[in-house]
Amino acid sequence: MMNNSGEPAVRARGLRVVRGGRTVLDSLDFDLHHGQVTGLLGPSGCGKSTLMRAIAGTQARVSGTLDVLGSPAGTAPLRARVGYVTQAPSIYDDLSARQNLDYYASVLDPSLSRAERADQVARALAEVDLEDHAEQLTGNLSGGQRSRVSLAIALLGSPELLVLDEPTVGLDPVLRRDLWNLFHRLADERGTTLLVSSHVMDEAERCRRLLLMRAGRVLADDTPEELRRRTGSATVEDAFLRLVDAEKEAEKEAGRNAAKEPRNEKGTGAGNPGTPAARGDQPGNDPAPHRTPDAGGTAQ
Ligand SMILES: Nc1ncnc2c1ncn2[C@@H]1O[C@H](COP(=O)(O)OP(=O)(O)OP(=O)(O)O)[C@@H](O)[C@H]1O
């Protein structure tokens, strides 16, 4: 789904991120659609958090094109329009849930009156079903309750895009279901775009669209139904495993073909990974023009 301008909510082309001298995201091309819940799934270490940080504008060494709500990721106009919840919630243990939210509401929009802030805070607490624990110190809340405080903070100011890094990890099945219902309500009723990561494949079935990642690359960008259909699988997990197996087989085949290639005088075969053709960077494949967004307060 596009918005009125016809632009997707997030547009990545030739997106690349280098961390510690290693390319951890490589040539990612995808769109996130307005008003949809997209699941970002893949094994541990495949690059989900790095991609989310890039979209939220907190990741260094991002190259390629990454536009968020029509502006380069991480630029000032996006600050109030994008809500981002990391895996490690940044909340103050010695403040109550309500005080935490009130503090963040005042930082996010210093022009709000006390009454306006109180309204926003009450609404966000209600949305994550935390009203009964609003006055408790967050240091005394359970893990799941603390994650909901973080989520409530991200909901302040009604952001158009919510980037949620494993928001349901460690939650019991009832809370997980309630949170997924909340994500869909936000998308359906407010038109919020959500990108939600998980490494639990059964959560994929709850998403309208999926980005499946493996080893820093997008393995599939599809709806759960279409993914199951085209791989002939009963579940998204099976579909993912089939795609991984097919990719590994293709990699092996490419390796065998490269080994068979006659070597030239310098000892590099035509299919060697060091040659431009094998890297896919011959002129016709270059996703130019590349643009490096301002990465803001950044992680390496
Ligand atoms: N500061 C860093 N320096 C170098 N490499 C890093 C750094 N942080 C992460 N990486 C590497 O980047 C890759 C992607 O990490 P990332 O945290 O994005 O993965 P993930 O899919 O979110 O994993 P998980 O599901 O376990 O949270 C991993 O191989 C990781 O080892």
Image (tube, rainbow, N blue to C red):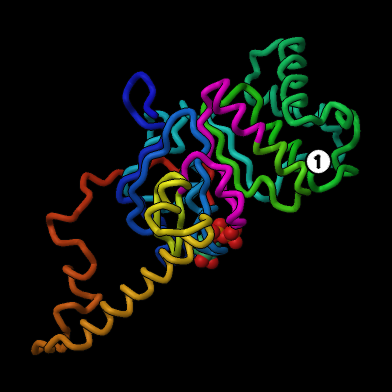
Q: Observer-nearest residue: 122 or 219?
A: 219
- The range drawn in magenta is 181-210
Q: Quadrant of residue 110?
A: top right
| Disc 1, SS | helix
Q: Position of residue 266 (x, y in %)?
A: 12, 87
In which quadrant of the rendered image does the N terminus lie?
top left
Residue drawn at 18 percent across, 55 percent down: 285
Q: Is residue 141 visible?
A: yes
Q: In the figure, 215 relative to 283: above or below?
A: below
Q: Which residue is mark 1?
A: 145
Decide whether residue 138 is among the magenta residues. Answer: no
Q: Quadrant of ligand 1?
A: bottom right
Note whether 238 is above or below 257 in the view shown: above
Q: Is residue 18 visible?
A: no
| Above or below 214: residue 41 | above
Image coords of residue 271 (percent x, y): 18, 77
Q: Residue at x 33, y 21 (%)?
A: 5
Q: Quadrant of residue 10?
A: top left
Q: Residue at x 72, y 26 (%)?
A: 127
Q: Position of residue 79 (x, y in %)?
A: 53, 30
Q: Is residue 109 left or right of residue 43?
A: right
Q: Residue furthest left?
A: 265
Residue 38 in percent (x, y) is at: 50, 41
Residue 208: in magenta span: yes
Q: Nearer the viewer, residue 18 or 29?
A: 29
Which residue type does callout 1 highlight? Gln
